[in-house]
Amino acid sequence: MRRLETAPEREERLVTDGRPEWAKRIAAEREARGWDASRFVEALRAHADRRLPGEASMLRRVREWESGETTPEEDDRPLIARTFGTVAAAIWPEAGRRDGHAELVTGTGMNTAELIACLRTGPVGSDVLEGLRITVDRLCSEYAHLPAEQLLVEGRAWLGRVTALLDRAPPAHRREVLSLAGWLAALVGCVEYDTADQAAAEATRRAALSLGQEAGDTEVMAWAYEMRAWFALTRGDFRGVIAAADAGCAVAPQSRAAVQLHAQKAKAWARMGDRQQVQLALDRGRMLLERMPYPDNLDNHFAVDPSKWDFYSMDCYRWLGDGRPSNAPENKLAATYARDVLRLGTEASGVERSPMRNAEARLTLGLVAARVGDLDRAVHFGERALQGERRSLPSLLMVSRELGAALKEQYGTEPSAAEYLDHLRQLREAVG
């Protein structure tokens, strides 16, 4: 007999009503802010850098957008996104996943085994460098999906091969080899931190920073500072987050790393309760991201997928909703962003494209549910978040503790809440 879908599962599953996803997103964003169509038009005018049509025409456009009858024009999309505090590519994402193994063979005529053989004995020519570029991109693209232990083994092995190559690299290629080693070190450091090996992660992060400095690669250097900001955030060192973010932005102010550094600052300010600084940091990161070309490879961990901006906003609004009425715009927006993160992070087949983001989205939905008094949904989403195989343990524990604190305060004597808190305690003890 087929199992009936529970109410929390129905909440998590995207309900298909025939409209395009962008149309549902526009309506959800407007409703979460408590705006009617006229108020939405007023907000659009406030954010526009050009004269918009009259009231009746704009109200008709809003109705057609939200029904999916008319797709917003190219120049309207950034305006809609700006009004909602996001980027156009987050509402109208482009798709595409690259096959790194196939690209290696096509681009170089070598498979992985042949590339390794060339690294050991052959000259460091353009074909070897191209093979390394493709391999590093592939490894960075497998961050969200590959089991952490496997990615650590592969990442460390390739880091060893590339650093050993430095002794044989011609002067013309040395900087690029250093840069590739820096990217690998940054990747390995991230995965080490995911597995709660904080000492190793910090040492590898410092190695990435050093390699970036030697290569003159400011993007690698900025990501090393972003890692420092992330580490500080999960430890509760919010001033440390801001210091690391400022240092990284000073090194590479127009880089993709800078986008994420502004997001880390926004998260830190949210936890310190400074709403003005949260909005300022989010606006700076959003404006920078909006000016950037769309990434060639969405899966690369260091690419900053534009749809991830909703993930950052979700975190901030979840915190800003603390202590506010359960129906406050902050809580509604946090839930809206969380549902969109889940939708974009899950393939049509049900396979999770972004399991770590999805876990935090579920915790956000759980926390919002707890705030509105729905214990069943709160526990459901909290338990689902703990079940993923690919996890970033420090980040997962950080957000899980937020939900745990709410459940303990509001439902401490309820068996389901106590069971979740026990599971959270077991995870915390396993991490050490």
Image: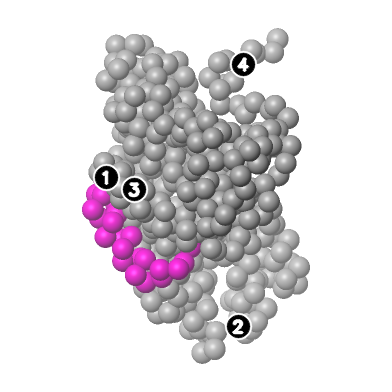
What's the residue at 54%, 35% (across, down)? 38
Helix, strand or loop status at disc 2: loop
On the picture, is 92 further left or further right than 360? right
Where residue 373 sits: x, y (%)? 38, 16
Would you name the residue on which mark 4 appears? Answer: 5
Cα distance between the residues tagged 4 and 3: 38 Å
Identify the disc placed on residue 278.
Answer: 3
Residue 137, quarter of picture:
bottom right
On the picture, is 424 further left or further right than 390? left
Q: Residues within 10 Å of mark 4 (few under 14, many from 20)?
A: few
Q: Amino acid at mark 2?
A: Val
Q: Is residue 246 magenta?
A: yes
Labels 2, 4: front one: 4
Would you name the residue on which mark 1 appears? Answer: 274
The residue closer to the viewer here, 290 or 261, is 290
Cα distance between the residues tagged 1 and 4: 40 Å
Asked if the residues shown at circle 3 and circle 1 are in contact, with their CB atoms under 8 angstroms apart, the answer is yes
Q: Residues within 10 Å of mark 2 (few under 14, many from 20)?
A: some
Cα distance between the residues tagged 3 and 2: 47 Å
Nearest to N terminus: mark 3 or mark 2: 2
The residue closer to the viewer here, 390 or 217, is 217
